[in-house]
Image: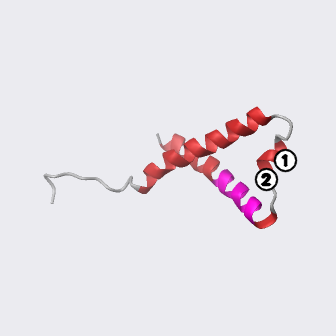
Amino acid sequence: METVHKVCLVFTIIGAINWGLIGFFDFNLVEALFMENNTIARIVYSLVGICGLINVGLLFNHITYDPIKK
């Protein structure tokens, strides 16, 4: 499962870089790379979104609740 988290983290970082480029320079890297193929761009956006949701689990990975241990 650690490999899946690392791959998702890479996709999330790519998405963050793309949002940074949009915010700072009004340049969308995904649209620039896949200008004519909207389907591939949508797939990339979907993968980044799914990976971001998977990475939310990393925030709470350290929290374990065991009612026996106090």
Query: Would you identify the image quadrant in which residue 42 lies?
Result: top right
Image marks 1 and 2: residues in contact by CB distance under 8 Å = yes
The residue under label 1 is 32
Relative image position of residue 20 (x, y in whole percent)? 71, 62
Relative image position of residue 10 (x, y in whole percent)? 62, 49
Residue segment shown in magenta? 13-23
Q: Residue at x 39, y 52 (%)?
A: 61
Q: Residue at x 62, y 45 (%)?
A: 48
Q: Is residue 20 magenta?
A: yes
Q: Residues within 10 Å of mark 1 (few under 14, many from 20)?
A: few
Q: Is residue 57 magenta?
A: no
Q: Is residue 47 left or right of residue 54?
A: right
Quarter holding the C terminus is bottom left
Q: Amino acid at mark 2?
A: Asn
How many numbered marks are there?
2
Q: Is residue 66 left or right of residue 60?
A: left
Q: Residue at x 76, y 67 (%)?
A: 24
- Judge by depth and name the residue closer to the eye, 28 or 65: 28
The numbered mark at residue 28 is 2
Q: Amino acid at mark 1?
A: Ala
Q: Is residue 70 left or right of residue 3?
A: left
Give the colouring mode of the picture.
secondary structure
Helix, strand or loop at mark 1: helix
Main SS of the magenta part reads helix
Q: Residue at x 81, y 57 (%)?
A: 27
Relative image position of residue 25 (x, y in whole percent)? 81, 64
Residue lying farthest to the left in this orientation: 68
